Image (spheres, rainbow, N blue to C red):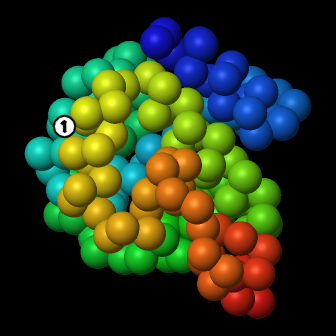
Amino acid sequence: MRYEQFVESVRERAGIESRKEAEQTVEAFLGTLGERLPRTERDGLEAQLPTQLKDMFSCDRGTDRYDLEEFYNRAEKRMKIGYPQALVRCKAVAGVLKDAVSEAYIKKVLHGLPAEYEELFGMREPGPLSPGTPEGDRGH
């Protein structure tokens, strides 16, 4: 998938008005994901993406270990929007990412993350206390 296609797909899925805002959303998501993934998974994911997206993953530090709720919180701060909007946008980017790379590699990436991250990529239904549902919003 080309860079332009990726960004446009995110813009459409998330209901974002401008291309620039969609690019910022993608960058915030990939930057947050880059912090969370082990180096080998991050490198493998980058290898399947256009150059412009690879640059958004750049992470000079080691891997941060945090749960899905913290993932959403970090992405929300980078996106500079509210938590409910960040959920929608994160799920949109994850869905496009899932479409852009091989299913086998998405499964490999998820294998290195806590099981709750499967819901981010639409591979399992969120539970009632999930940070990815209004009920699991926990006061955000």
Q: Is residue 52 above or below residue 87?
A: above
Q: Is residue 80 above or below residue 122?
A: below
- Residue 72 is left or right of residue 50, and the answer is right
| Occupied quadrant, residue 133 | bottom right
Q: Which residue is mark 1?
A: 43
Q: Position of residue 82 (x, y in %)?
A: 79, 66
Instruction: Identify which residue is drawn at 66% across, 23% down.
Output: 9
- Residue 106 is left or right of residue 62, and the answer is right
Residue 76 visible within the image:
yes
- Residue 126 is left or right of residue 111, and the answer is right
Q: Is residue 4 above or below residue 120?
A: above
Three-letter residue code for mark 1: Asp
| Occupied quadrant, residue 22 | top right
Q: Position of residue 132 (x, y in %)?
A: 64, 68
Seen from the viewer's position, the closer of residues 80 and 43 is 43
Q: Quadrant of the C terminus?
A: bottom right
Number of numbered discs visible in the structure rendering: 1
Helix, strand or loop at label 1? It is helix
Residue 25 visible within the image:
no
